Amino acid sequence: MSRTEVSRPDTVELVRTDPARPPVAVIDRSPMTTGKKMVFAAIALVAAVAWAIIAFVRGEEVNARWFVIAAIGTYIIGYRFYARLIEYKVVRPRDDRATPAEVYRNGKDYDPTDRRVLFGHHFAAIAGAGPLVGPVLATQMGYLPSLIWIVIGGVLAGAVQDYLVMTLSIRRRGRSLGQMVRDEMGTVGGAAGLIGVFAIMIIIIAVLGLVVVNALAESPWGVFSIAMTIPIALFMGVYLRYIRPGKVSEVSAIGVALLLLAIVAGGWVNGSAWGQEYLTLSKVTLAWLLIAYGFAASVLPVWLLLAPRDYLSTYMKVGTIALLAVGILWVGPTVQAPAVSQFALAGTGPAFAGKLFPFLFITIACGALSGFHSLISSGTTPKMLEKESQARIIGYGGMLTESFVAVMALVTAVVIDQHLYFVMNAPEAVTGGTPQTAAAYVNGLGLGAADTTPEQIAAAAQSVGEESIISRTGGAPTLAFGMSQVFASALGGDALKAFWYHFAIMFEALFILTTVDAGTRVARFMLTDTLGNLGGGFKKFRDPSWRVGAWVASAVVVGLWGAILLMGVTDPLGGINTLFPLFGIANQLLAAIALTLVFVVVMKKGLFRWAWIPGLPLAWDLVVTMTASYQKVFSDDPAIGYWSQNRRFVAAREAGETSLGTATDPAAMDAVIRNTYIQTTLQALFALLVLAVFVVGMVVVVRAVRAGGLPTSEEGDEPSHRFAPSGLSATPLEKEIEAEWLRVDPEGVFHGAQGHARDREAAR
């Protein structure tokens, strides 16, 4: 068959690994045009003006529009210039080198996936509850520090971690974070890393599972709509695999239409007698269903359920957030929260205790810097990536997208009346649980605005179809209330406020579930990597797709987080409720491990000049997490320090008291004593494990500096046999090359494992 020659400018190079086949890579060295330079300069100027208004304008009302403008402008500049710097100087991608998905393609875990579907999977997996809940809770500190950390932290820390961990894993057969720590730092650092990462991972999954259960309990609408995403995803997976391969846009349209239908039908089911009877599920039932789903999603082929469901979920999340951004730009709500609140320095906020430093940077994790992301970046995603160059849009771009979700969550919290904000986020022990007592409490906080009344609090609950919004802690109800207020102003008025409120609650639960299923699969990879290190008969576990190993590891993982979850839903003071306070710091400690690994590899490769790129976020994260860990263990304030709280309750029990604070009976007091023992021990243990990884890593760094670089565990090159565009949208040249591949290789004979097998056979 004749092959057409692709036209291109002189600055574009086409790379072939076989003269008889079409190009596998495009290297574009075209300089930026004057027009583009002017566009980026204008974007930077507008973003700078927005930041100046947000940060310095006082005495006048601040419009939430500036939040959207400042964030989007910063993301565009960060992605175009900072991410490109990292790509050129540190990552140095080569699309003529095959990725693990291509080399080890098996249709189970390793499977080259269209970058649009993979972006959806990766984004949905990392963007669970964190970017929605953390910013809402942190609003008590004021909008300015929260916004700065979300946007600047996302560009300089979170996206850097996600992108660089992903590239490390791509060049190491898609190895998990803990295994890469062991490979690069030796047995001691590796053991600390593997233990720390796996333990933290189990806690994170259990915490997210509890959030899902709480969101769906007694909610037929949420249960039906979320349950329907599973058969829709299975259909999409089969459709793309067998019915219409490669037709991503086509299956996307079908999937989104079915998803919207499921959401609308969920409202009908919620109002039906059978829906109320059969889909009003208890927390225990939901916990068991979640465990079963987590196991199934972990062992089924990744193309069948996990990737299409996450991709489908991304449409809903990105679409909703984009609609919210448009609504904010259209309505222009006024910011009600102060730039920096009185609680930022006093550390006595009703939503959570602790001063701005370090606890703001712990509360806002996802959206700025989250260790959980490094697990996805070294778990499912690198085993599905078609080309190394796609890591920038998926790793760095995916994180910026999540950061924008966090900005939107922050806006929903700062534009509502601040008395209502604290009514919803202060614990019932201080609000009293009634409109009268809640109004008296928040009016005494000195918020600087007109006092609220019990009637206003009751009316706010009625406007969203709830009996009460008092002490609806956890962030999700506040997010839903703020979203309903914005959407009602832009679409439909107050008549639809209740609909938007319940839509937002279901919307959040849907995305937390995507984090649970991906997290379970990643934890399975970590466990099989760990078992494979034992040698002997355990060597089979080194293949993450070995069916027996995958099923055994998945059963162990869901058994661990499932048991903790079940204890939590049956005992309000046990199980995951014991570990929930550890979630924030543990997540950031995980980021310290990931950034230490990246820093070590950069130094081992001799890229000393660019070591500051991972070094700066690593240094900041260590300072934050170690300070927070120290305070949680040793602070004299019982509202902050676990041990101080423990001693307070022990003394009360010894004095014969039968209640204290929120513990209303002796059994509850004993539970607090038990929980704080566990929390103190685990907090100290996690901090020590991270310090061990860091110290070992710095020893390796010193050796690397003295030697001018050291060998890494990066695997050797294998030539690629496929082509794929680098960005979400293919350029005209990339479309031509895709068409050429389709003409010469319509059946994909040379793609993936088949092509590599032929090459190896020819070499023999």
Image (cartoon, grey):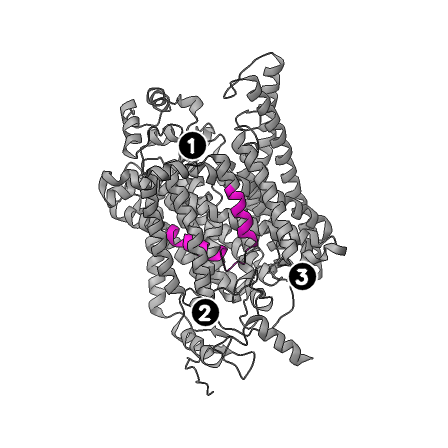
Residue, x 43% and y 38% (percent of image)? 215
Mark 2 Cα shell of 10 Å, populated few (<14), some (14-19), many (≥20) = many
Q: Look at the image and say whether residue 243 sits in the magenta stretch.
A: no
Q: Secondary structure at mark 2?
A: loop
Pair 3/2: label in front: 2
Amino acid on which the number 3 mark rests in the picture: Ser
Nearest to the observer: residue 19 or residue 155: 19
- Nearest the viewer among 76 and 329 is 329
Residue 337 occupies quadrant: top left
Residue 473's label in the rendered image is: 1
Disc 1 crowd rating (10 Å Cα; few below 14, some 14-19, many 20+) is: some
Residues under labels 1 and 3: Cα distance? 46 Å
The image quadrant of residue 669 is: top right
Q: Amino acid at mark 2?
A: Pro
Quick check: 690 above or below 185? above
* Residue at x 35%, y 69% (from the top left corner): 34
Task: Give x and y (percent) for residue 750.
Answer: 55, 76
How far apart are the two marked residues, 2 and 1, measured between alpha carbons? 44 Å
Image side of residue 634 versus residue 743, left or right = right
Q: Is residue 719 visible?
A: no
Q: Which residue is mark 3?
A: 713
| Span shown in magenta | 289-318
Residue tagged 2: 725
Cβ atoms under marks 2 and 1 closer than 8 Å: no
List x then y, in percent, for residue 273: 34, 37
Upstream in sequence: badge 3 or badge 2:
3
